[in-house]
Amino acid sequence: MLDRVMEIIDGAFELPPLREDIPQGDVPGGRIRIYENHKEKADQVFPLLLKELSALSSSGRKKAVVSIYGGSGVGKTGIAAILAYYLRENGIGSYVLSGDNYPHRIPMYNDAERIQVFREAGVRALAREGLISEDVNREVHDLQVKELDADPKQAEIYPWFERYFQSGRAALSEYLGTPKEIDFEEVSSILKAFSEGSDLIALRRMGRTDTELWYEMVDFSDVDVLIVEWTHGNSDYLEGVDIPVFLNSTPMETLMYRKARSRDGKEDSCFVTMVLEIEQGKLYDQAPKAKLIFAKNGELLDLEGLKRVTEEGSL
């Protein structure tokens, strides 16, 4: 129960050494590698998380939902796994749930839908404003084939491009991180069932193909803290989160991470870069609701501090 948190804070909690086999929840694709910087940040988050849990316990709550959220490469999965491990080692049952199991489409189809949303809105805007011609249609097609139709620099070459790009980006923003893309209702129902004390809850599992989709009954009878690790863990569409924890990374930090992990030297496409920029903007819009905000280096931030590091680290 959460009252165990009070005992830990009144006494001395432990940050036990990590084992290589600590549970990592239900992240699609299996285990991820946990690095030393994940542990360093988890060590900074854990004492403050305990204080937030203590406040809930003092109000009579028996269970709590924590979200560990942020952008690409910030370490959500690894940090959430370590925090859950620390809680369990200190006598507080915990489980990590990955929100990445709850899009309406498997990753391959969702990636295709994102591109379709962007391109359809772009060409529709050109048609509505009388900007189409055989030449324009050919130019649009060529840019799409080369995956350059999401590159804002093309506006320097094509007079019609700005209208195509801005219309497509606006439509994409209305899709990303909304109920059009993600089943927030199902995730919210899981959080509600957990908070109300359900012992067995069906959780969704998925891979990367349309034959890798199933459900598993998970025993929550000994779980006091449910940790949701997810980019969208503080979304206005998500209900039932008690303690949102924002792990921030600046656009420059995200870019460096994406380059470091690129395969065969291939960097993100212009389209992927645009998706990340839109998601990052939404994360900043949600920041005022976060209980705790941490910079990528582990520094605890308030909203002014978040604004400062964002401006300092902007591209």
Image (spheres, rainbow, N blue to C red):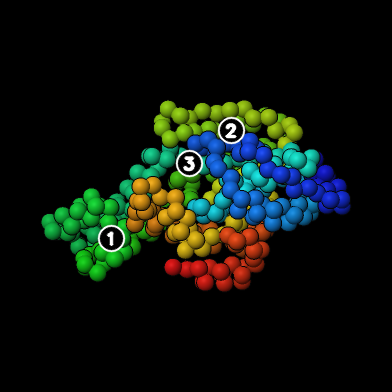
Earlier residue among tags 3 and 2: 3
Residue under label 2, please give it. 203
Q: Quadrant of the N terminus?
A: top right
- Going from N to C along the chain, the mark reached first, 1 or 2, is 1
Residue occupying image coordinates x 40% and y 50% = 262
The residue located at (36%, 58%) in the rendering is 169
Among the 4 quarters of the image, the one containing residue 208 = top left
Q: Disc 1 or disc 2, which is closer to the eye? A: 2
Using the image as rendered, state which of residue 145 and residue 123 is in the foreground: 145
Q: At label 2, which amino acid type do we have?
A: Leu
Picture quarter containing residue 219? top right
Residue 96 place in picture, x, y as percent: 63, 40
Q: Earlier in the sequence, mark 3 or mark 1?
A: 3
Cβ atoms at labels 3 and 1 below 8 Å apart: no
User: In this rendering, does residue 57 appear at all?
Assistant: no
Circles 3 and 2, Cβ within 8 Å, touching? The answer is no
